[in-house]
Image (cartoon, helix red, strand yellow):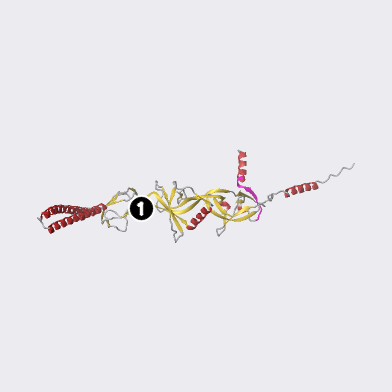
Amino acid sequence: MQTPRKLPFIPLGLALAGAFLLVACGGKETPPVPGAPAVTVVTVQTESVPVASELPGRTSPYQIAELRPQVTGIVKERLFKEGSEVKAGQVLYQIDPATYQAAFDSAQANLARAEANLYAARLKAGRYAELVKIEAVSKQANDEADAALKQTQADVGAARAALDRARIDLDFTRVTSPIAGRISRSAVTPGALVTANQADALATVQKLDPIYVDLTQSSTDMLRMRRDLESGRLQRAAGYAVPVQLVLEDGSVYGAEGKLAFSEVTVDEGTGSVTLRAVFPNPQGVLLPGMYVRARLAQGTQDNAILLPHAAVSHDPRGNATVMLVNAENTVEPRAVKTGQSIGDKWVVNEGLAPGDRVIVEGLQKVRPGSPVQAQEAGAAAAASAAPAAAVK
């Protein structure tokens, strides 16, 4: 009996493969190309973000007083410790008062003499005023007595003014601090000759709590911010006091928050910038005059803003920003964008993107424009990597 010959299975396999291929081709989504590099993308979404400017600046004293002598003499004593805190009215230098004390005593004696002459002249003028009524003295004699009285009154006034001037000069031998603050090193020592209103200061007192921070903002940025506020793209921050955050030279954030005090009304012709002044509390003396700082000023809120990680944005030699998108065909597409401020590790993208765009954030070194890729959302990639670790536990 002849055994039936088995039919080959090759045609059946080909038929099944063709059927699967037809089903796949009839789908709406383009399947990932086998062997295409995998990239991580973020899908663009809009959100409201605070808008802040980071401006350079330097600290300056809240008050400053340069101590200069107002009388000439020899410095007899220095009554403060260099670099210490001094109080308003505290005596800092003592100039030899001997000559000024003598001048004061002389002026005091002259005033006493003038007052004695005034007393005698007043009595004489009073008597003559009675005698002229009975014609016991002539009118001329009465007029002379009255004139002498007025002259002695003027002498008393001049003597009293001279005494006041001598008292002021004597007081000026004690050089006092007009403000409370920290005093600098002394430019003179006891025994030095100082002159009235000399050009060189004996020392400088600076009030450092609170302290000023002078900032500079370009007029271009100021105009752009005004346009954004007028167009409604930027919503003005609530309240009138603008809070300011300070970043120190070492990158650390200053612990206390300051407030914007005023803005200049004139643009500097040399730099094209406007000066802003902020006030910061400085109880611990951390901020010293002349320190370079950067200040962050909250200026409002930008609605419908797009944020992208720094790693997703690249810049060409001219500074133009570009990103790489994954389009509907799962191929790479370059896109030019315009970035604004940086918030943390993200850029605010002002132009070039729309909600729903998929931007490559990881794997950029493996792709080029027009090449196919296998895209995976950043959140999904993180969850997939975390799942095996959870299973092991």
Seen as rendered, the residue at the extreme bottom is: 270
Residue marked by disc 1: 64
The percent position of residue 36, horizontal first and vertical second, equals: 66, 51
- Name the residue nearer the viewer: 268 or 24: 268
Q: Which quadrant does the N terminus fall into? A: top right
Residue 362 appearing in the image: no
The percent position of residue 206, horizontal first and vertical second, equals: 36, 51
Residue 65 appearing in the image: yes
Which amino acid type is marked by label 1? Ile
Tell me: 6 left or right of 87.
right
- Name the residue nearer the viewer: 123 or 172: 123
Seen as rendered, the residue at the extreme left is: 136
Magenta region: 370-379
Residue beneath the point at 77% across and 49% down: 18
Tell me: 67 left or right of 24.
left
Tell me: 10 left or right of 127.
right
